[in-house]
Structures are given as structure tokens and as C-alpha cells.
């Protein structure tokens, strides 16, 4: 294989303006602003340097980014919001120029970064297929040859001659991805925009990107859905603060990202600010205990365990029809288990000012690994408190079947009680 993308010491700097005047600007402020701009222009002429302003801040969205992508590789780009993922894709798509460094691309690039990019709202879907295809570098003959495939993939044939300004965001994405994917690019770049589509269409898009990868073409994919990144890509790049933290096999990079996210979970629940709900009741503590009340953050497969959520409520708030719920999720965001007192029919006659909601789970069924807990409380479907993720637990190997065997299963995340017999058969 040969390198189709080579990025060397890439950097992107933005100048961020800060409002120096509090409140509304006056006519005097406007005049002084004009005078300042004139002084700055004169200073630039005589000194060759830009005059510095106290209300202008330099912000590096990317800094010292270097990596190489070989032909046919499927690369996931992950990181928190503001890490520089979208900026990197915009530079690779030639939408914006880098401040430092350089990139080298081999082959035709097709990108899908924002809903409706390259569309004209007054034109119909049919007309925008030709317009967007031309922008992406397709010839008119190529567009005509691919037209039926694009329409069939987008599933908008009924609205093909309707102006796209009347399309929903999901219809925008369907049409835009269909055009971009059928361009037959050597490099396909896709941002988080696919999150707008429904689950069925997302699955369809993943299948198409997987097909593109198997054809020896290159895919760069940005998403916060780590399960999707894991299933689609073979390698990944983790960005934080505009720099590459690690790149390599996808699972290793996702594990490193999970370690970074764990720093948020280590903050005590009572001090967490990344929560939703009206606050009439707040979850302030979490613990995993055995049936004797011994606590920790580890549970063995097959162990009887109690999940304990400490809470406080406001004294003047009525608490009726309160539901406590939590889910157990993988580090990639896949929901494994859901527990809620309304599912079991357990109801509470009164909620104390300070209390604990305790959920007992016999023979915990997950295989060894690290899992996240998302917790929430509702009153008559109104969110009181929502924290996701709220905590992490570690599941260790245990004697689930009571046979003394603790071998870790190779398939699937769950263990289930079962038995075997041999029966006679007439056949």
C-alpha cells in the first residue's frame, strides 16, 4: 500500500475577539474603534508587523499534527468537543487553509461535513444532485450514470422535484451522503453529520462506507459514537486540545479515550455539574455492594450484588410516582442492561429527605470488563436528575455457573443460566 494522505506539522490558528466594552457600545466606542483600526493599519505599514490588541486572543485549534494514512485504510477520528476534529477534516477537504505545516493528498476527495453543504435551498433535489455532484468533481455524464443509484440510496424519490428548503435535516443528509458516496472517491471524509439520520439509514451508510473500504478506497470518519467507530474503522486517531494524543489500532485508541473520559467520572457525584433535571431530587452518591453491605467498585460475574444510589431531595417538594433508573453501558456507549423500579412494579410510599435507592441484582450476568453507569430519577416522567455517565464499575471473572470454572467467554457480553441433557430421538 502507498500513502494517500500525509500530514506534516499541521497547525490552524484563529484570532478570537473579546468584547472590551461592557453593555451596549456607544457612538464614542464606534469612533474609537475606527481610530484604533487606522492606527493598527499605519503601524503595519511602517513596522511590517501587526499591532497587538488586548481584546484579540490567538487560539490554536490544531497544533503539530502529523500522521500518514495508507490506501484502503479506514480511520476513525475521535475526541471531545473542541478537540479539533472538524477543523482537521475541513483542512483535509480544502475548505480552509492551514496556518502551519502541509498536507499531501493523492486521489479525488469527497467530503460530507455539514448538513446541506453544497446545496442550494431554492433548487429541487434533482437539481441539487447535479449541482452537488459538480461541486464534488463529477462530470455531467458521470452524474447521469449514477443518478438512479443516488436516488435509490437516498430514498427521497417522492420528493425529488421538491425544493430542498422544504426537506427535513434527515432528508438533507440522505441526499448529501448518497451523492458523496457515489462519487467513487479515492478518499471519503465523513463528519458526525450521520447522527442526524435515523438508525436504519445510519446502518445503510455504515454498510456503504464499509463497502468503499473493501474496494481499496480510504475512509476518514469522525463520530462520538464509539461503537460505530469500532465497527467501521481499523485504526483511529485521538485528538485532545488540538494535538494527537495517540494513533493506532482502533480498540487501543478507544481504550485510551476511555481513560481520559474517566477523569470526569472521578469527580464526586455531589459536585458534578454535567447533569440535567429540575434538581428537586439529586443523586449524590453511588456504591456497589455485596449482600452483606461490603462496598467497592468491582463485582464478579455471577455475584449477587446491590447497586446503591444515595440521594437528597428538597423539603418543600412532593415526591409521588418517582422512578429510579440506571443503565449499564460499555465504554463504547453500547447499552447493555437497564434497571428501573417501574419495570419490576416496585413503588415507594414515601421519599425521605436523605435516602438510598437500592437495586438488588442476583447473579450479575456481564463478562469481565469495565462498564459505565448512567443514572437518572424521574417524577411523573419529569426528569429530576440525570447523570451520564455517573460512575464506572469493573466486572471480574467469577464462578457464574458454580462449577469452579472461571474461563472468560469468547463470544458475547452476557452469561446466562442454562443446563444440558441428552434425549432419545426416533429420527
Image (cartoon, helix red, strand yellow):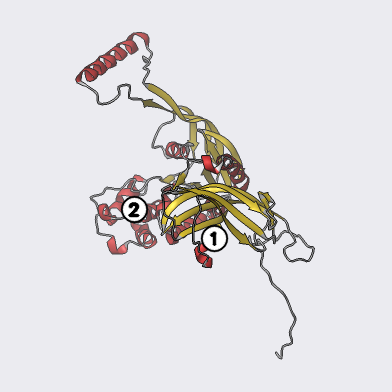
User: Residue at image x 69%, y 59%?
Assistant: 301
In the orientation shown, which residue stands out farthest toward the right?
404
Query: Residue at 23% of width from left, 50% of height from top?
Result: 122
Crowding around mark 1 (Cα neighbors within 10 Å: few <14, some 14 to 19, many 20+) is: few
Tell me the residue that label 2 is attached to. Answer: 169
Residue 126, x across and y down, in percent = 28, 56
Q: Identify whether 53 is placed above or below 295.
A: above
Whether residue 323 sits left or right of residue 362 in the image: it is left
Q: Which mark is residue 338?
A: 1
Q: Earlier in the sequence, mark 2 or mark 1?
A: 2
* Count of all numbered marks drawn on residues in the image: 2
Q: Residue at x 72, y 63 (%)?
A: 400
Q: Which mark is residue 376?
A: none
The one of 66 and 54 positioned closer to us in this rendering: 54
Observer able to see residue 74: no
Q: Residue furthest top?
A: 46
x and y, in percent, of residue 380 in the image: 41, 59
What distance separates the C-alpha of mark 2 from that of mark 1?
31 Å
Q: Quadrant of the C terminus?
A: bottom right
Report the residue that reaches farthest toward the bottom.
Answer: 426
Q: Position of residue 10 (x, y in %)?
A: 50, 30
The answer to which quarter of the image holds residue 257 is top right
Position of 311 with respect to 419 (left or right) is left
Query: What element does badge 2 sit on?
Result: helix
Which of the two residues, 106 or 232, is positioned nearer the viewer here?
Answer: 232
- Image quadrant where one finds the N terminus: top right
Amino acid at each position: 500500500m502507498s500513502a494517500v494522505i500525509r500530514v506534516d506539522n499541521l497547525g490552524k490558528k484563529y484570532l478570537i475577539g473579546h468584547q472590551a466594552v461592557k453593555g451596549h457600545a456607544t457612538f464614542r466606542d464606534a469612533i474609537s474603534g475606527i481610530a484604533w483600526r487606522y492606527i493598527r493599519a499605519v503601524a503595519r505599514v511602517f513596522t511590517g508587523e501587526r499591532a497587538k490588541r488586548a481584546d484579540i486572543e490567538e487560539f490554536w485549534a490544531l497544533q503539530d499534527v502529523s500522521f500518514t494514512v495508507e490506501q484502503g485504510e479506514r480511520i476513525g477520528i475521535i475526541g471531545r468537543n473542541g478537540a479539533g476534529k472538524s477543523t482537521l477534516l475541513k483542512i483535509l477537504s480544502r475548505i480552509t487553509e492551514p496556518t502551519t505545516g502541509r498536507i499531501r493528498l493523492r486521489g479525488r476527495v469527497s467530503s460530507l461535513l455539514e448538513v446541506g453543504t453544497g446545496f442550494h435551498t431554492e433548487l429541487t433535489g434533482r437539481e441539487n444532485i447535479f449541482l452537488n455532484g459538480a461541486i464534488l468533481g463529477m462530470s455531467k455524464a458521470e452524474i447521469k450514470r449514477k443518478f438512479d443509484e443516488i436516488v435509490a440510496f437516498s430514498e427521497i424519490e417522492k420528493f425529488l422535484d421538491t425544493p430542498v428548503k422544504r426537506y427535513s435535516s434527515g432528508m438533507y443528509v440522505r441526499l448529501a451522503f448518497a451523492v458523496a458516496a457515489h462519487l467513487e472517491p479515492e478518499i471519503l471524509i465523513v463528519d458526525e453529520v450521520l447522527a442526524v439520520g435515523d438508525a436504519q439509514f445510519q446502518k445503510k451508510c455504515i454498510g456503504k462506507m464499509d463497502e468503499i473500504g473493501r474496494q481499496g478506497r480510504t475512509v476518514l470518519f469522525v463520530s462520538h459514537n464509539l461503537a460505530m467507530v469500532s465497527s467501521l474503522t481499523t485504526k483511529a486517531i485521538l485528538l485532545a486540545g488540538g494535538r494527537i494524543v495517540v494513533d493506532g489500532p482502533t480498540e487501543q485508541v478507544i481504550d485510551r479515550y476511555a481513560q481520559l473520559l474517566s477523569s470526569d467520572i472521578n469527580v464526586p457525584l455531589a459536585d458534578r455539574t454535567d447533569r440535567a433535571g429540575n434538581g428537586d431530587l439529586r443523586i449524590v452518591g453511588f456504591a456497589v455492594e455485596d449482600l452483606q453491605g461490603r462496598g467497592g467498585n468491582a463485582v464478579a460475574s455471577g455475584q449477587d450484588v446491590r447497586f446503591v444510589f444515595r440521594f437528597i431531595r428538597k423539603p418543600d417538594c412532593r415526591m409521588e410516582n418517582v422512578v429510579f433508573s440506571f443503565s449499564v453501558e460499555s465504554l463504547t456507549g453500547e447499552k447493555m442492561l437497564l434497571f428501573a423500579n417501574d419495570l419490576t412494579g416496585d413503588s415507594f410510599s414515601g421519599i425521605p429527605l436523605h435516602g438510598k435507592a437500592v437495586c438488588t441484582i442476583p447473579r450479575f450476568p456481564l463478562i469481565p470488563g469495565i462498564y459505565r453507569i448512567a443514572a437518572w430519577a424521574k417524577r411523573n416522567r419529569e426528569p429530576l436528575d440525570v447523570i451520564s455517565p455517573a460512575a464506572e464499575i469493573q466486572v471480574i471473572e467469577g464462578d457464574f455457573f458454580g462449577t469452579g470454572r472461571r474461563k472468560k467467554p469468547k463470544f458475547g457480553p452476557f452469561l446466562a443460566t442454562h443446563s444440558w441433557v441428552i434425549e432419545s430421538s426416533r429420527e
